[in-house]
Image (cartoon, rainbow, N blue to C red):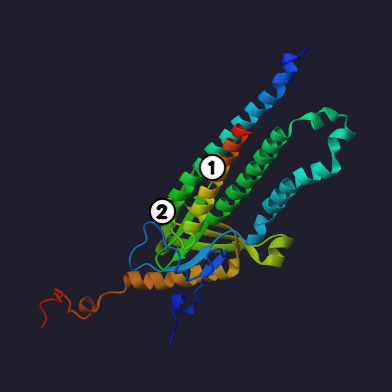
């Protein structure tokens, strides 16, 4: 017996996963009651390394500054005369800025998601604090799916970009740096015939009616 | 004799620090607003945690300003 894609997926319970199959813990704003989320994708966790390293370095700087005391090396001894209260305030401000950088980068990663349901693809782009955009296309609109991997990091950690060509107003959906790009492309490709089958499958009462005869479906409430 | 320009330096630095802290508070309020909006678009199991993170950051900014003003 043929299994549908949704039956083949293993539900993931990790809300921070970059690749989550059948995530029950996520909903989209306009999600229909009979719509099932099949995949949730984010950029691969490895793509967070640059900003994590930056934040750790910035967080360690005040400590390094206190230990090495570079001010005395470059002839800025007057810095030592700054009152303690101001030094503490400057340090607090520094850590607030570092925490802000970390929080913003985390949120950009967390809210930049690509969703694949049994009916459509949704691309939520969170572009910083002042703007976001959400684009969606029905599975039946998809014309071509292509995946690409390039570079050592993408080969080692198995992530890449999936390009989806559609017939809709937004011609191309790009899932950037997502884990398992070949598997994602496979799932989307397998979903298209399932969706077409669902859309074009005729109800039984129409399919069995003789030509020229109109069948009116019975109201289930009137049946004994 | 007291040099008035030297005596004012800490006050000026403190003023600049408070201004910058005010900017971080404004930034944190923007973060909080945006997180609320995104949680409506994409509600997940972690939505309350993310909202708490944003709220915590806003609280820290406010606390830092109060500390800077008091000390």
Q: Is residue A187 visible?
A: yes
Residue under label 2: B40
Q: Nearer the viewer, mark 1 or mark 2?
A: 1
Q: From mark 1 to mark 2, how far is it between C-alphas?
A: 19 Å
Q: Position of residue B63 (x, y in %)?
A: 57, 41
Q: Quadrant of the N terminus of chain A?
A: bottom left
The residue that appears at 69% across and 49% down in the rendered structure is: A55
Residue lying furthest bottom? A1
**On the rendered structure, is A189 left or right of A149?**
left
Q: Chain of mark 2?
A: B
**Viewer-side residue, A26 vs A72:** A72
Residue under label 1: B28
The residue that appears at 70% across and 40% down in the rendered structure is: A91
Q: Residue A160 is drawn in which quadrant?
A: bottom right
Q: Position of residue B8 (x, y in %)?
A: 69, 20
Q: Quadrant of the C terminus of chain A?
A: bottom left
How many residues crowd mark 1 within 10 Å: few (<14), some (14–19), many (20+)? many
Q: Position of residue B58 (x, y in %)?
A: 53, 44
**Viewer-side residue, A141 vs A9:** A9
Q: Residue A178 is drawn in which quadrant?
A: bottom right
The residue that appears at 50% across and 69% down in the rendered structure is: A189
Q: Do the residues bearing badges 1 and 2 touch, measured as CB atoms within 8 Å?
A: no
Q: Position of residue A212 (x, y in %)?
A: 14, 74
Tell me if residue A114 comes above or below residue B16 in the rendering: below
**On the rendered structure, is A89 left or right of A104?**
right
**On the rendered structure, is A76 left or right of A57?**
right
The residue that appears at 50% across and 41% down in the rendered structure is: B29
How many residues crowd mark 2 within 10 Å: few (<14), some (14–19), many (20+)? some
Tell me, yes or no, whether dots 1 and 2 are on the same chain: yes
**Viewer-side residue, A46 vs B27:** B27
Q: Secondary structure at mark 1?
A: helix
Q: Secondary structure at mark 2?
A: helix
């Amino acid at each position: 017996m043929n299994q549908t894609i949704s039956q083949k997926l293993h539900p993931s319970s990790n809300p921070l996963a970059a690749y989550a199959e059948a995530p029950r813990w996520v909903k989209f704003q306009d999600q229909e009651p009979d719509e099932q989320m099949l995949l949730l994708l984010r950029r691969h966790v490895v793509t967070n390394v640059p900003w994590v390293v930056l934040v750790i370095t910035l967080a360690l700087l005040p400590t390094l500054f206190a230990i090495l005391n570079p001010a005395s090396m470059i002839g800025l001894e007057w810095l030592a005369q700054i009152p303690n209260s101001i030094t503490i305030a400057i340090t607090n401000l520094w850590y607030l800025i570092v925490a802000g950088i970390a929080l913003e980068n985390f949120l950009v990663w967390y809210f930049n998601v690509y969703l694949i349901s049994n009916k459509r693809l949704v691309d939520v782009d969170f572009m910083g604090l002042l703007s976001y955009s959400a684009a969606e296309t029905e599975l039946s609109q998809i014309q071509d799916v292509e995946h690409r991997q390039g570079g050592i990091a993408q080969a080692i950690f198995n992530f890449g970009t999936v390009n989806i060509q559609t017939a809709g107003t937004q011609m191309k959906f790009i899932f950037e740096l997502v884990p398992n790009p070949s598997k994602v492309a496979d799932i989307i490709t397998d979903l298209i015939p399932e969706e077409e089958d669902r859309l074009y499958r005729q109800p039984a009462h129409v399919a069995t009616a003789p030509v020229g005869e109109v069948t009116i479906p019975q109201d289930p409430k009137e049946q004994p | 004799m007291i040099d008035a320009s030297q005596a004012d330096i800490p006050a000026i630095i403190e003023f600049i620090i408070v201004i910058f802290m005010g900017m971080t508070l404004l930034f944190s309020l923007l973060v909080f607003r945006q997180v609320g909006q995104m949680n409506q678009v994409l509600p997940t199991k972690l939505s309350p945690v993310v909202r708490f993170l944003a709220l915590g950051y806003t609280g820290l900014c406010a606390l830092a300003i109060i500390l800077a003003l008091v000390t």
